[in-house]
Image (cartoon, rainbow, N blue to C red):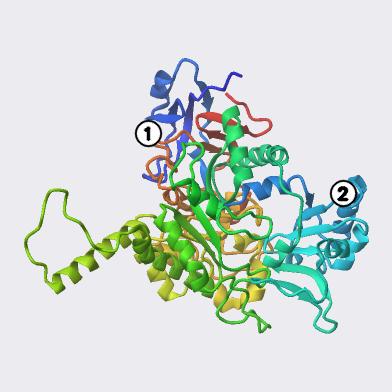
Amino acid sequence: MKRPTRNLTVINAVVYDPGSAYDTAPRGVVVTDGVITFVGSSEQARERSAPDAQVIDAGGRFLMPGLIESHGHPGMYAKSLLQVDCRPAVTPTVKDIVEALQEAAGQAEPGEWIAGWGHDEHRMDGPGPTLEDLDRAAPEHPVFLRRTCAHMALVNTAALERVGITDDTPDPSGGCIVRDPDSGQATGLLQEKAMSLVDLPADTPEGMTEGMRLALDDLASKGVTTVHDMSSGPTEMGVYQTLLAEGALSVRFRPWYFALAQGEFPGSYDAVLGTGLRSGFGNDMLRYQGLKFVLDGSVGGRTAAVSEPFEGSSSRGILYYDTSEIEPLVARAVASGQRVAVHGIGERAVTQALDLIEAGGRDAAAISGGDGSSEAEPGHTDQRETTAQEHHDSTDHDAQEHYDTVVRSRRHRVEHCGLPNEEELDRLRDGNIIAAASTAFLYELGDSYLNNLGPDRIARTYPMRTFIDHGIEAPINSDFPVTTPNPWLGIYAAVARRTSSGRLLDTVQNISVAEAIAAFTTVAARASFEEDRLGRIAEGYLGDLVLMGRDPFSVETEDLKDLRPVLTVCDGRVVYHAEGESND
């Protein structure tokens, strides 16, 4: 099979490089063998083009680097594109959800699982679905309807019976089988690790590949050229390698293996450490990053581990583990050459995440044998007697050096990092730990956040202004399919701090358009140690480009969320062009 050329030239473009001054004079960009080899005048760009290069006349439009989604779930998204779509935009009422599930049940084999995804009671017209609604939709089929946050699911009676959940079934550790407060009956709502009680059919490579092709097309249409997969497992990795071998991988992937089994995600901790796989292994299209651990749930589902109760409630969410229970696992991972990403949204979870990363760094010294002692070089004996104080100082120095090596230099991550307090901000900065901020949540999920947290807490939720002012690396992400994998919604949320319903959340944490774009380009590139390869339009950088229909710096703030690419280039290949747009 002949693969498309990786040579491409763009002329007459307003080139925006987040790493340099903004110049509105039209210029040209040359990509050769997938790498940017020239940025300058359009005339020179033509002259430097490879003979087989595709030449695109941008017509004076805005050209920017490919956008980096620093936290998403492509495998989950791929599967969801083949499941019943129950997002509020598609099924705004319970009646719509029932009808969609009924249609799926009518096409399914008897007793086959019906899986749906994406419902959010906070954005629906009227109340959200119940067990009785799912029974009405598919009384003869077990139904699993995953909420948009992916931290809880609603099932029907047939599903409860299939998996043996009764009113007396105890809650699993780190999860909750929600029950009616009066009758004690299971309501069908399964929170966090209670979802692991459901035996959904195992993913198949064939099914995942089919869905992944759809996901790739969708991501490219949004200008996304690199994705950090935060829940990779063996199936996802196999699909990525299959598509890479075919030359069909049109988005770069940066996989993080899901460490410990939870819900539909298999745990890969032992397998990863058993193979000796280390962070950074791979190539420009597919490069392994590390292990991901999860500590709490979501704000929308009121399962995030907050320090004070959710509004109008006595609940402070769910913290999955005691620190002593999980700390040895993190330490062993760090000692084995892993970067770690730790999901923490509520204050209690953010604190625990930092505790684990810091303790893991200290404990890793003992696990790897780096206990501060050192041996003389072979054949050399140090005859000078060492005092106790000198030995202590040397040990402290070696321990600090080791800590810097396995913590500060690794750029570990706190995923979401929704509600850090002042002390945690200092710890993030001092540990060179990335705050993988899900600021995009504030647009689609912001109403539920405001309702559940109240105005005081919302003003320090996903605090982009504070992160930047503290010198903390904070790439913005969508956590798709929890929210839409459209970076411009995240950019709008960071700049405007408004929800999809138009509610203003705060006027404290707003950042500029340039800072928001950097969070999806240059800052996000640092999340994979690729700041010298990704996120800029400069010579020597990878040929990932997005041609926009409008200049983000010239539109009103409210129009940012409506911006769309007309052309997307990944690895020097056109992977998307808008309908009606010429490819040359």
Crowding at dot 2, Cα within 10 Å, few <14 / some 14-19 / many 20+, comes out as some
| Residue 276: x %, y % from top left | 45, 47
Using the image, determine if residue 62 lies above or below residue 182.
Answer: above
Residue 104 disc label: 2
Q: Measuring from the top left, give residue 13's x and y in whole percent.
A: 48, 33
Position in image of residue 338 (x %, y %): 44, 53
**Number of marks drawn:** 2
Residue at 38% over, 23% down = 44
**Closer to us: 38 or 11:** 38
Residue at the image position 79 percent from the left and 64 percent from the top = 154
What SS does tag 1 mark?
loop
Q: Residue placed at 47% from the left, 68% from the top?
A: 327
Q: Height in image: 494 above or below 281?
A: below
Q: Is residue 565 visible?
A: no
Disc 1 residue type?
Gly
Q: Say if residue 326 shows up in the picture.
A: yes
Type of amino acid at the residue the image marks with label 2: Ala
Above or below for 225 versus 201: above
Q: Which numbered marker is on residue 540? A: 1
Foreground: 491 or 175?
175
Residue furthest to the top: 51
